[in-house]
Image (cartoon, rainbow, N blue to C red):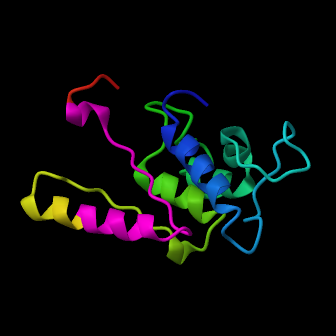
Amino acid sequence: INQGFCGVAAAAAALNSLRTHLDTALGLPIDPIYSPNPYATQSALMRSSCANAHVARYNDTFDGVLNLPGGLSLAQVARLLECYLPKASVRAQNVNLTAPWVAERVHRDLVDALRDPRKRVVVNYDRKGVGQLG
């Protein structure tokens, strides 16, 4: 786990915040640090068999997370969340805010999501796209 894993940190934060709004404990892995409480940590999420099978492994010989460039893609973060949430409840999308109508749609989607206490919004971005190192 390093600075390239902001997606894992965002997934852990979202899952932990949802525990009080859902009927189950989401089947979160138990990190030994917090045992016996199910609490999502970056390490516990990435050590899960689901993450290994559906997020990290591209094939039997290549680990697509720990090899360069490292970190997770948007699709991988969605698959990580789907390890613990119903697949239909996870929506991940790339957004290019340069089109004038896109900003309005994003605003509408954010307002809609933030009105519902059972929804979360996670925003990650490509630092290079805004002129930052990363």
User: Is the residue 104 above or below the residue 131 in the image?
Assistant: below
Q: Residue furthest left?
A: 100
130 vs 46, left or right, is left
**Would residue 62 appear left or right of 94 to someone viewing this image?**
right
Look at 81% across and 53% down and name the residue there. Answer: 38
Query: In the orientation shown, which residue stands out farthest toward the top?
Result: 133
- Position in image of residue 70 (x %, y %): 48, 33
Depth order, front residue of 100/6: 100
What residue is drawn where x is 50% and y is 59%?
A: 78
Q: Is residue 41 visible?
A: yes
Residue 30 at x, y percent in the picture: 83, 49
- Residue 6 at x, y percent in the picture: 50, 38
Residue at point 91%, 49% (across, down): 36
In the image, farthest residue toward the right: 36
Quadrant of the image occupied by residue 62: top right
Magenta span includes 122: yes
The image position of residue 54, as x and y in percent, is: 60, 58
Mark yes or no: residue 57 visible.
no
| Count of numbered marks | 0
Q: Is residue 121 shown left or right of residue 133? A: right
Above-or-below relation of 74 to 34: below
Q: Quadrant of the N terminus?
A: top right
Point out the image quarter for the C terminus.
top left
Residue toward you, 116 or 128? 116
Residue at screen point 89% across, 45% down: 35
| Residue sitting nearer the eye, 112 or 24 | 112
Residue 121 magenta-highlighted: yes
First to last magenta residue range: 106-130
